Image: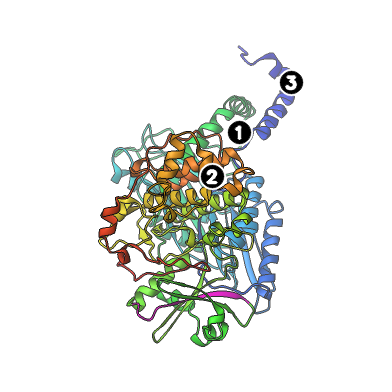
Amino acid sequence: MNIMPPFLNSNMTLYMIFSIYLLFIIPKSTSLPSYLYNFCPNTTFAPNTNYATNLNTLLHTLAANVASNPTSFYITSAGKGTSDAVYGLFLCRGDQNVTACRDCVKTATTTDLPHTYCPNSKVATIWYDECMVRYSNVSIFGKLSIEPKVSMMNSEKINGNQTRFGDFMKETMGETAVETANNRSGIKFTAKTVNFTRSIALYALQQCTPDLTPNECSQCLTRAITQLSVMQGSRVLQPSCNVRYEIYPFLNGAVNYSASSVYNNSVPPFVETTEIGQKKLSNKMIIIIVIAIVVAIPLKVLAITFCFMKKRAKNYHHSIPIGCSEDFTIADSLQYGLDTLQSATNNFSDENKLGEGGFGGVYKGILSNGQEIAVKRLSKSSDQGVEEFKSEVLLAAKLQHRNLVRLFGFCLAGEEKLLVYEYIPNKSLDHFLFDPEKREQLDWGKRYKIIRGVARGMLYLHQDSRLRIIHRDLKVSNVLLDKDLNPKVSDFGMARIFGVDQSQGNTSRVVGTYGYMSPEYAMHGQFSVKSDVYSFGVLVLEIVSGKRNSSFYQSGYAEDLLSYAWKKWRDGTPLEFVDETVRNSCSIHEVMRCMHLGLLCVQECTDDRPTMATSVLMLDSHSITLPMPKQPAFFIKSYMKSKNLDELTSNSTPWSMNDLSVTEAEAR
C-alpha cells in the first residue's frame, strides 16, 4: 500500500525544493563562532611597521578565501622572502558549511586576533568550535606542530563503568586516527558514532591540517588522544590536529549512524564511519529524511542550542595548557633594558610622571619607534623576589582582552623592578567621574558602555581566560579609559590564580581597598569570584550616582553609598540616587537596571549575588527579569576602625593615570 501523500507522488521535486528552502530560512541561533582558546606568546611587533602591514594583508587574504576552498583549509603568506614575512592559515571543521566557516574566519581575522585577544602579537593561534586560525613570523606550511596542547573536558563522569568506557573510548579513537590519517579525500577529517551501551553513544571527531603527511597526522592524533580525559566529553586542541568526543550529537552537516550492536565484555563494538560527502542514500531514504527534518528541525535547533549552551556554561572546563613552554624563558623574552626605559622616560623625570601609587610611581615614556608606554617603577623597598616578580609578569602578560590593560614587558636591573604597560591617555575613571567639570563628559551612554566593558573584562578573568583569576582590588581608580573612553581594568598585583575546579580561597593577609571589599573577605579573609562581584556592584553604584563610596562616611546622607542606594530603592525614589548631570538625559530603563544590578551584586550572602556571566547577560538583555535585591551588606565601623588600615588598603592615596599598583606577592 502506498501511504505517501498524493502530492508527494505528483510534485516530489517541488516539495523537496520547498523543504530544502525551509532549511535555509530557519533562523540560526547565532552567527558568531564559539570561542574556545587562544595562544599568543607575547612576541610583539610595533604598530606602523612592515610586519604590521604584512599581517594586515594576510588576515584580509585569509578572510577573502573561505568560499573558494572546498576543503575549508587555506594557507598564504605576505611579504615572503623578507625579514618581515608573515605566514598564516585557517582550518574549518570538516562538517561546517561555508557560511559557518566564513563567519568563523572573519571573526578571527577582523576582530578577535588583531584587537581582542592577540593585538600586536607576531605569533598567534585561536581556536573556535567551528575553525582554527593561525599565523606566525616563520613558515608553518607542511610542518607538524603539537604545541601548545589545550585540553578541555566535561566535568561530568560517565554513569556506570568509567574504566570500561575509557578503554572503549581510547580504542575507538585510536582506530579512527588510522582512518583520519589515511583519508583519501584529502581533508583528513573523520566523524563517527558508536554505541557503548544501549543508552550511551560515543560521538567522535578527528581532524588534521591537510598539509601533513599520513605519518605526521597519525603522530599528531596519537599524542592528542593520550591527553583525552575519561568523562562525558573531552577534546584536545593542537595547531596541527584536534580530537573530540561527546556522548551527545554535536556534528553538523553529516548523517550520524548509530551502530546497532552494544559494547560489552563479549561482543566487540561495531563501528560504522560517516565520512562527509561519501555516503550514498536511496531516493526513499532522502524523502524520509527531508520530511523528518522539515517537521523536526525548528524544535531540534532550539533544543540542541539550549542544551549545548547549558552544558558548556555548566560542565565544560579548560585545563591548564599541556606542554607549553610558557615559563621564565618567555618572561625573559619580555624583558626591556634599563637604558631603554630610562631614555623613554627622560630618566624617570618629574615631567614624565603620571601618578604615584602605593607601590611606586608611573611614568609616561616614548620608545625609539614612537610607541607610547606607561612604566610602573616599583618601590625599591618592596621585598618581592625576582621569581615571584616574573611569575606576576607572566600572569599579567597572558591576560589579553579589549577591556584589560595590556602588559608589554618588564625590566629587572639591580634594585630596579619596572613594568611596561600600554599607555592609556585618558587617565582613570575616577579622574572623570568625581571631577565637577569633567564628569559632564561622561553622559549616560558613555557610563553604560563603561559598566558593560568592565563587566566583560571581569567575566574574562573569571571564566574565559586561561585560568580562573580573582582580581581582589576592582575599583574606579583601577579602571582606565582609552582615547574613546573605553574601559580597561588594570592592576593585577593582588590577583590570585584559581584552578578550574576551585571556587573560593582563604587568606590571613587581607589586601584591597576599604569600601570595595566584600564583608566575608574583609572580616574573614574569604575571597572568591563573588568577592569581585561585590566590588563590581560598588563600582556600578558609584558610576550611576557620581558619588564616591568614601564620601558618605560621617556624612548626613547615610552610613555609606550602599545604604543610601538601598534607602532610595526601598522608598521608591531611585531617581534621586542618579547623578544629577545625567538624570534628565539618561535612559531611565538602563539607569534603573544598573542600579538594580548594583544592589544585587552587593548583597550580603554570596549565593545571592549574580556571577559576572549573569551580570553581563543582565546588561545585554533587557528582556530578562531581575530578582528583587536584598538589603546590602554593611560594614561595622567599630570593627573596621580596630583593624590596621595599612593592612586593609593597598592604595589609599587616589591617583589617576595608569593606577597600576603591584603588591608584595603571596604564595600562589
Does 401 appear above or below 12? Answer: below
Label 2 close to label 3 by CB (< 8 Å): no
Q: Which mark is residue 11?
A: 3
Does 131 appear above or below 586? Answer: below
Q: Secondary structure at mark 3?
A: loop
Question: Between marks 1 and 3, how big is the CA–CA gap?
Answer: 20 Å
Residue at image mark 2: 578
On whether residue 379 falls in the magenta region, the answer is: yes
Within 10 Å of disc 2 (Cα), the crowding (few <14, some 14-19, many 20+) is: many
Q: Secondary structure at mark 1?
A: loop
Residues shaded magenta: 371-382
Horizontal and vertical percent for residue 464?
47, 53
On whether residue 168 falls in the magenta region, the answer is: no
Label 1 close to label 3 by CB (< 8 Å): no
Q: Is residue 210 shown to the viewer in this render?
A: no
Within 10 Å of disc 3 (Cα), the crowding (few <14, some 14-19, many 20+) is: few
Name which residue type carries label 1: Leu
Label 1 close to label 2 by CB (< 8 Å): no
**Residue drawn at point x = 62 percent, y = 51 percent:** 443
Quick one: 397 or 376, which is closer to the camera? 376
Q: Which mark is residue 364?
A: none
Name which residue type carries label 3: Asn
Q: Is residue 270 left or right of residue 98?
A: left
Horizontal and vertical percent for residue 596?
48, 40
- Single out the mark in the foreground, 2 or 3: 2
Q: Secondary structure at mark 2?
A: loop
Q: Which one is earlier in the sequence, the residue at label 1 or at label 3?
A: 3
Residue at image mark 1: 281
